Amino acid sequence: MAASTTDTREQVYNVREDDQLSSGVALVTCVLAQREIYIAGFSINKELLTIHYSDYSSKKPVWELDFFEQLFASEPLLAVREKVRGIFVASDRNLIVPDELYNETAAAGWLRKLHYVERQEALSGYALENDRATYIQALPLNIAELIRINFRKATVRPLPYYQFCERPAMSLHLQLCFTKGHCIATLHNYSQLLWHSYIDYSCAEDVAYAVRHYCKENYIDAGKLHITCNALAASEFDIINELSRYFTIVKAGNGLTINNPWTPPVTLANQLLECV
């Protein structure tokens, strides 16, 4: 189900028709990305019950504080803060540093050289144990503070963290996560991390071009990629479906067939919960 106003758009997924479904929510995960928020509610047994998604017009600032403040205050799934177990934040200003090179001060300097980061912005580092590296990202300070104040007991991690968690032992496994206007791409060859990138896109061809360009530069056969896709919104279904024109194997995040628009958001919800 989707609804929209002039400035905002909402999409809701329920695992079944039940007026009392939300009352069974015991665990919640939440994703904040540029101009959008994604919230998933689970039962005490970790069964996904519902997903609430909202975004706002690209005419407004990328991280509009009022939008997130109002959602935090009015969204029923966030009403009981103790139920929120994980907050995942997507920032296109990021850097991965191998553990043997990591120094907090130096890494912050490297990030500032690669991206425009204002001095008062919040920089955070997260250990990627499987890849023996640290993931650093920048976030507007007011958004970081809003998360800290509202969700003191929740685990906070970057959105692509799930792409570095337990994953299938697979050659050339490319994980894609579609947010509004960005595709987060992470490529592993079995346990070896090869590539991580935020790809700006307006159509599937933009993503296909970026992936194929990387493969060409690094002598990788793009036809051998095993691509799994997640998304924050059901509205990204057409983009994901279109990728099949460019690549042989395109599956959902759990490795199964993408058979309806909500499959990518649902598989994302379950993968994020496993990383909390």
Image: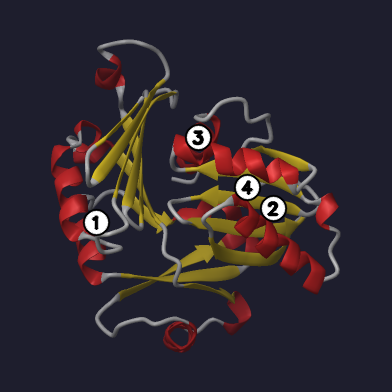
Mark 3 vs mark 4: which is more N-terminal? 4
Of mark 2 and mark 1, the one earlier in the sequence is 1
- Residue ID for mark 3: 270
- Which disc number belongs to residue 166? 4
Query: Is 270 in front, or is 166?
Result: 270
Image location of residue 60, percent across then percent down: 24, 60
Mark number, residue 174: 2
Label 1 element class: helix
Q: Which percent across, then down, holds residue 189?
A: 77, 58
- Residue 93 vertical placement versus 239 (above, below): below
The kind of residue on which mark 4 rests is Glu
Cβ–Cβ under 8 Å for marks 2 and 1: no
**From the viewer's perspective, is 54 left or right of 129?**
left
Residue 185 relative to residue 181: left or right: right
**Please, is residue 258 above or below residue 272 in the view?**
above
Residue at 16% over, 51% down: 69
Q: Secondary structure at mark 3?
A: helix
Q: Amino acid at mark 1?
A: Ile
